[in-house]
Image (cartoon, rainbow, N blue to C red):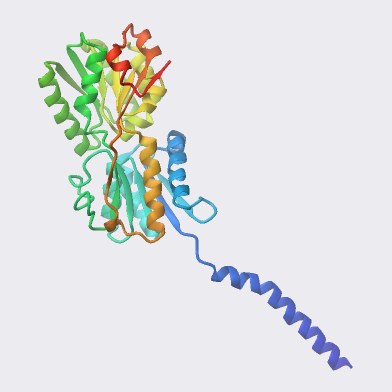
């Protein structure tokens, strides 16, 4: 009798152990959730709306953060020289794919850090010239992404600014020398454009918030008629500061993307950065599903948008010509 009781107890113990252990074993057998490495130039507070767009692209591809995909975020806090270390950290964590939207230096850092982990970039310049891909149609290695055409439309953006300020003879340009490749390209495009338009050009450099303040202080003494802010991820993180300084110094200013105008800037002409983030999210999702970067052609943005802040124009005592109003994608009142 006692032996039977022991056997029953042993049976119940074994059965209970199996009941507890089975879910653990089942979970262990489930497929691990893939991890995306996200390499951002700015900080979460600067790029919240863009992250929303990135996640939207992931959702379109069937992935939801926290459910069937995880994201490791690394933020450079506006410092290009941190990109290499952050990229190496993501590679060391063996993420499934690295997403680098909106930062050519970040894309180059990721490319230098790994030749095997897939990379999805978003850059405003020609990715072939940047050394990221072999060709637009056939990237050929572990990187692909979006070319969103902010640098390529420099001359057109300057022409729109001049149409808004037809009396301008001297134009200043704010460029970030920390990204030497982009800075040189923008400078060359501007110099060619001003020669064609018969304008004088003054180049101002800034790679920190203090240097932006100093550049605007210099503008007050130089008597520039208008300001052209070059396309740059750092400037994007300082868009409120730039819009406020332009208003304080009453200088008509052209920007690359609409977010500056929403912050109070005069005008922007370029592609949608938010949509670029969405497209990077879509491509990241495709790679998680098994697509290879070498087989995904670099997407090129074709739609350009002109955004004008009419309230800022009135403050600057500018009359927006009907020719611009008729083609503007949005006029912010």
Image quadrant in which the C terminus is located: top left
- From the top left corner, tell me how far across and down residue 18 is, in percent: 69, 77
Horizontal arrangement in the rendering, residue 325 relative to residue 46 (left or right) = left
Rendered residue at 29%/21% (across/down) = 254
**Which of the 4 quarters of the picture holds residue 3?**
bottom right
Residue located farthest toward the front when viewing the structure as drawn: 326
Nearest the eye: 256 or 323 = 323
- Asked whether the viewer can see residue 229, the reply is yes
Rendered residue at 27%/57% (across/down) = 294
- From the top left corner, tell me how far across and down residue 201 is, in percent: 16, 19
Horizontal arrangement in the rendering, residue 115 relative to residue 54 (left or right) = left
61 relative to 21, above or below: above
38 relative to 169, above or below: below
Residue located farthest toward the top when viewing the structure as drawn: 317
- Counting every numbered tag in the picture gives 0
- From the top left corner, tell me how far across and down residue 226 is, in percent: 25, 15
Nearest the eye: 301 or 41 = 301
- From the top left corner, tell me how far across and down residue 332 is, in percent: 41, 18
304 relative to 142, above or below: above
Rendered residue at 21%/28% (across/down) = 154
Rendered residue at 31%/8% (across/down) = 318
**Which of the 4 quarters of the picture holds residue 225?**
top left
């Amino acid at each position: 009798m006692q032996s039977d009781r022991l056997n029953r107890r042993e049976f119940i113990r074994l059965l209970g152990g199996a009941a507890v252990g089975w879910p653990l074993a089942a979970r262990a057998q489930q497929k691990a959730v893939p991890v995306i490495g996200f390499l951002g130039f700015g900080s979460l507070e600067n790029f919240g709306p863009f992250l929303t767009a990135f996640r939207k692209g992931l959702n379109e591809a069937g992935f939801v953060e926290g459910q069937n995909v995880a994201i490791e975020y690394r933020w450079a806090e506006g410092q290009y020289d941190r990109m290499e270390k952050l990229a190496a950290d993501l590679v060391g964590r063996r993420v499934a794919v690295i997403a680098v939207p909106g930062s050519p230096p970040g894309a180059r850092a990721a490319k230098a850090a790994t030749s095997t982990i897939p990379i999805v970039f978003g850059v405003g310049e020609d990715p072939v010239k940047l050394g990221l891909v072999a060709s637009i149609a056939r990237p050929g290695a572990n990187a692909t992404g979006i070319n969103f055409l902010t640098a390529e439309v420099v001359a057109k953006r300057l022409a729109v600014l001049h149409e808004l300020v037809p009396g301008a003879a001297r134009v200043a340009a704010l460029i970030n020398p920390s990204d030497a490749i982009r800075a040189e390209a923008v400078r060359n495009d501007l110099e060619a454009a001003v020669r064609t338009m018969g304008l004088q050009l003054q180049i101002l450099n800034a790679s920190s918030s203090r240097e932006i303040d100093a550049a605007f202080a210099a503008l007050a003494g130089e008597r520039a008629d208008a300001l052209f802010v070059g396309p740059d991820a750092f400037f994007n993180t300082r868009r409120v500061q730039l819009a406020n300084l332009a208003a304080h110094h009453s200088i008509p200013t052209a920007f690359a993307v609409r977010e500056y105008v929403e912050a109070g800037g005069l005008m922007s002409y370029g592609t949608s950065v938010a949509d670029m983030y969405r497209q990077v999210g879509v491509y990241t999702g495709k790679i998680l599903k098994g697509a290879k970067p070498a087989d995904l052609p670099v997407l090129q943005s074709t739609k350009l948008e002109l955004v004008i802040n009419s309230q800022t124009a009135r403050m600057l005592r500018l009359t927006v010509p009907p020719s611009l109003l008729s083609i503007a994608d949005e006029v912010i009142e």
